[in-house]
Image (cartoon, rainbow, N blue to C red):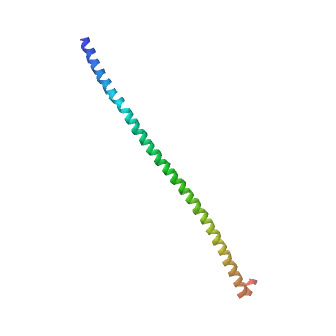
Amino acid sequence: MANEALERELVILKHQAEESQKEVQKLPLRLDTTLLDLATKNQIITQVHEEILGLRATVRALESEKLARQEVLNHYLELCDSLVRYHSHSMFPTLQLL
């Protein structure tokens, strides 16, 4: 009876060993699949990072353009104010006293 129990245990252990061996044989494929997945994700991350850098450069360029346009607009506003003051004083010299 002890021999039968040992034989059953041996059969179970052999079966477990075979299953483990099958799993071990699958590991290289799983590893390759995982590495390929990581490489793909890394490539996507790199592309997104490059796009972000490009967008930041675009934002900086737009901000610079905005500032330049604001300076031009301020200059034109100052000119308009000067013209209005000039014409007000020349057309209505009495307003200068107010």
Residue 58 versus residue 71 in the image, above or below: above
Coordinates of residue 47 in the picture (x, y in percent): 49, 50
Question: In the rendering, at what x and y percent does residue 51 appear?
Answer: 51, 54
Which residue is drawn at the image coordinates 62% and 65% (left, top)? 67
Q: In this rendering, would 30 be left or right of 67?
A: left
Image vertical order of residue 82 relative to residue 33, above or below: below
Q: Is residue 90 above or below residue 54?
A: below
Identify the residue shown where x is 32% and y is 29%.
Answer: 22
Examine the image and state in which quarter residue 54 appears. Answer: bottom right
Return the residue nearer the eye: 91 or 4. 4
In the picture, the quarter occupied by the N terminus is: top left
Q: Quadrant of residue 60?
A: bottom right
Instruction: Give the position of the C terminus as an image quadrant.
Output: bottom right
Q: Is residue 11 left or right of residue 73?
A: left
Q: Position of residue 86 (x, y in %)?
A: 71, 82
Residue lying at 56% horizontally and 56% vertically, measured from the top left? 56
Residue 33: x percent and y percent? 39, 39
Task: Give me the residue at 59% from left, 62% from top.
Answer: 63
Q: How many marks?
A: 0
